[in-house]
Image (tube, rainbow, N blue to C red):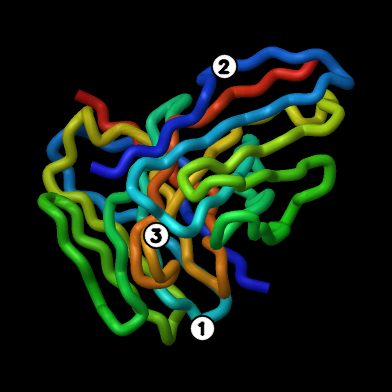
Amino acid sequence: KQEVTQIPAALSVPEGENLVLNCSFTDSAIYNLQWFRQDPGKGLTSLLLIQSSQREQTSGRLNASLDKSSGRSTLYIAASQPGDSATYLCAVWVGQKLVFGQGTRLTINP
Amino acid sequence: DVKVTQSSRYLVKRTGEKVFLECVQDMDHENMFWYRQDPGLGLRLIYFSYDVKMKEKGDIPEGYSVSREKKERFSLILESASTNQTSMYLCASILGGAHSDTQYFGPGTRLTVL
C-alpha cells in the first residue's frame, strides 16, 4: 500500500529565506506527483505536476524535483514571502486515485 | 480557468438527517472525486466517478453514496448523518487521462453534524 510522508509537519522561517519541503513515498510505481497549496479553510490549489518520466518542474519561485528510485520529491521555494504561508501537500497517482501526504504547515514571518 | 464549485461552504445538520453535497465543474471533465479531510488523517478518498452513472468506491465509502446523472455534476449523499461525519468535504475533477493532468479542487464544504 502506497504511503506518502511529509516532514516536517510544520515549518516557520523569516521572510526572504529559501526553503525546501520534503515528500517521500513508499512505492516507486507512480504515474506522477503533484504539489498542492491549501490556505486555511479553503480547497487545494495545484502548484506543480511532475510526470514520472520527469525530474523537475518549475513555476516562478517554485521548483519541484522527483527522484522515483529513492521515493522522494522536494519543493523548493525561493525568496519566501508572507503570502507563501499555507499548508503544502504532495500527492502521488496510484492506479485511479491520488494518495496524499498530511502536509507541511509553512509560516513565513515578516 | 477551470472552476469547481460546491453548493455550500458551511452546513449544519442533525444526526439522522439525509444530507446532499453538490459539486459542479464547468470544463467537461470526465473524472470527479469526493474526499474528506480531517486533522491528523489528511485527505481520504470517499468515492470517485470516471463517467456519467459510473462510480467507484474509494478508501472510506461506508455511510456515503454518490450520484452522477450529468457529466458536470457529482453529488455526495449521507443517507443518515452521524456525528463522526463532521468534516471538511472536498470535491475535485480532472480532465481526460487521470495520470497526466492536474486535479482541480472546489473550495470545500465544512459539514457539522450535531
- According to the picture, the residue beneath numbered tag 2 turns out to be B10
* Residue A12 image position (x, y, % from top left): 34, 36
For residue A79, side relative to residue B107 (left or right): left
* Residue A63 image position (x, y, % from top left): 20, 60
Q: Which chain carries label 3?
A: A
Task: In this rendered view, identify the residue nearer to me: B27 or A36.
Answer: B27
**In which quadrant of the rendered view does residue B74 lie?**
top right
Question: Nearer the N terminus, badge 1 or badge 3?
Answer: 3
Residue type, mark 3 in image: Asn
Label 3, label 2: how many angstroms apart (C-alpha)? 32 Å
In the image, are marks 1 and 3 on the same chain?
A: yes
Label 1, label 2: how many angstroms apart (C-alpha)? 38 Å
Q: Say if residue A18 shows up in the picture.
A: yes
Q: Say if residue A87 shows up in the picture.
A: no
Q: How crowded is mark 2: few (under 14 residues within 10 Å), some or many (20 or more)?
A: few
The circle on residue A22 is 3
Task: In this rendered view, identify the residue nearer to me: A62 or B14.
Answer: B14
- According to the picture, the residue beneath numbered tag 1 turns out to be A29
For residue A53, side relative to residue A61 (left or right): right
Task: In this rendered view, identify the residue nearer to me: B103 or B77.
Answer: B77
Residue type, mark 1 in image: Ala
The secondary structure type at the circle numbered 1 is loop
State the residue at coordinates (11%, 51%). A60
